[in-house]
Image: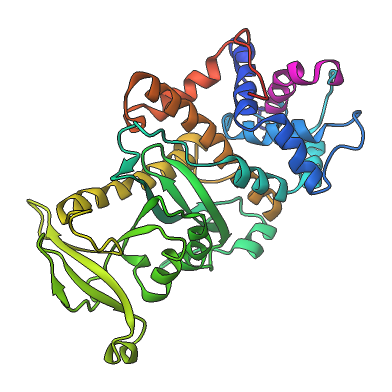
Amino acid sequence: MARTKATLDAGARLADYLTLGYLAMNCPLEQVRAALADHGKQSQRRRGLPHEVLVYYVMCLSLYRDAAYEEVLRIAIEGLRRIYGGEIGDMVVSKGAISQARHRVGADVFESLYRSQVRVCGPDSMPGVWYRGVRVMGLDGSTMEVPDEAANAASFGYPGASRGAPAFPRFRFCALVECGTRVLVGAQMGPYRVSEHALAGEVVHATQPDMVVLADRGFTGYAFWQQAQANGARLLFRARASQVLPVHQRLADGSYLSKLYETPKARRRDHGAVVRVIEYELEGRDESYRLVTNWLDAEQAPAAELAALYHRRWQIETAFAEVKIQLNGQMTLRSKTPELVRQEFYALLIAHTAIRRLMTQAAAGSRLACEDLSFMHAVRVIKRRLPQAAFSPSA
């Protein structure tokens, strides 16, 4: 039985066009053209689907998960007429032609745009963004499902299952999140078989000296610790229960200095990385916590404050949920080939950042914390804005 193509209701059509304009403000047209030129993907002729339009179209797919490809393209074309003027005429492009155009552009353009355009954006005065002069960041990884196509299965692989077989292939990704705004930066993706540690090793290159990075116990090992602090960032990771952290020196706030060792042999020779350990329990819970940090001065960063700060790490879980479920609408991406999966993933992160920037601006104007605003409400606001509200792509 043939399926009916999903369309957008007639009353929403004009309101949807500004969505594209807002994306253009956050990822300017001149930057899109530059990325296309850098990768040799600029349009050679105007009679077909311009590659600039195609880039914004893929971003729009994130906001219109329930609409057919052709319907989303109509929004992209109408939304960009103000940019192109008479350069874009009426065009009818089939689903197959859209797929071919996406393959011609490829994924590298989108990854380049993500890395050049997506940055931390929390202002100095916003609650939750800073702690004692350093920007609060979370580090973690997750997975996403992709359509069960042979190419996707071969490239990404399936997760293990105790019974039966998984329905969909998955890829793994890792990212840093600015906890105060939930913007995801430095993201890296790879096949499911690639470990979070391996991806995180690439992600930590995005850290800076004015950051404190929060991470769960799975990342607390000597080699990764050395890699993560190489750029000068402060680290605050949870230690594994089995991790040996001998007390070398007690500090006034109850924390103590210890060392992370790479091997038992290194421990015997006392060749390790000096860390500060903070132990505590939460009231009403039997579970105990041990945090390790390279912030060794207890007066600059008291143990009680760092213990409270660590629990802001959960902001990255909320950010992942926004990308995977609230924005994407489901756990499975649309794209049926590995190249287009990668393209869609980075376009999804760019669209998520655009929404988070809008929320950050709104919160700053109201002197609120960005995390106090509703993400889904922001998505609805963007999608219903009228086109008469002018936009400037070069803003």
Q: Quadrant of the N terminus?
A: top right
Looking at the rendering, the stretch of residues picked out in magenta corresponds to 71-87
Q: Is residue 85 magenta?
A: yes
On the image, the x and y values in percent for residue 193 come to 53, 68
Q: Give the total number of marks visible in the rendering.
A: 0
The prevailing secondary structure element of the residues shown in magenta is helix
Q: What residue sits 69% from the left and 59% below the top?
A: 151
> Eyeballing the image, is 95 above or below 331?
above
Of residue 59 and residue 231, the one placed in the foreground of this image is: 231
Say left or right for 279 vs 207: left
Q: How is the image coloured?
A: rainbow
On the image, the x and y values in percent for residue 85 come to 81, 16
> Eyeballing the image, is 13 above or below 346?
above
Say left or right for 129 vs 243: right
Residue 189's quadrant in the figure? bottom right
Say left or right for 266 vs 328: left
Residue 158's quadrant in the figure? bottom right
> Eyeballing the image, is 191 above or below 320?
below
Q: What residue sits 45% from the left and 55% below the top?
A: 142
Residue 227's quadrant in the figure? bottom left
On the image, the x and y values in percent for residue 159 come to 49, 64
Q: What residue sits 75% from the left and 23% below the top?
A: 77
Q: Is residue 386 visible?
A: yes
Q: Is residue 206 magenta?
A: no
Q: What residue sits 51% from the left and 68% below the top?
A: 198
Q: Is residue 168 visible?
A: no
Outermost residue to the top: 388
On the image, the x and y values in percent for residue 147 come to 61, 50
Q: Quadrant of the C terminus?
A: top right
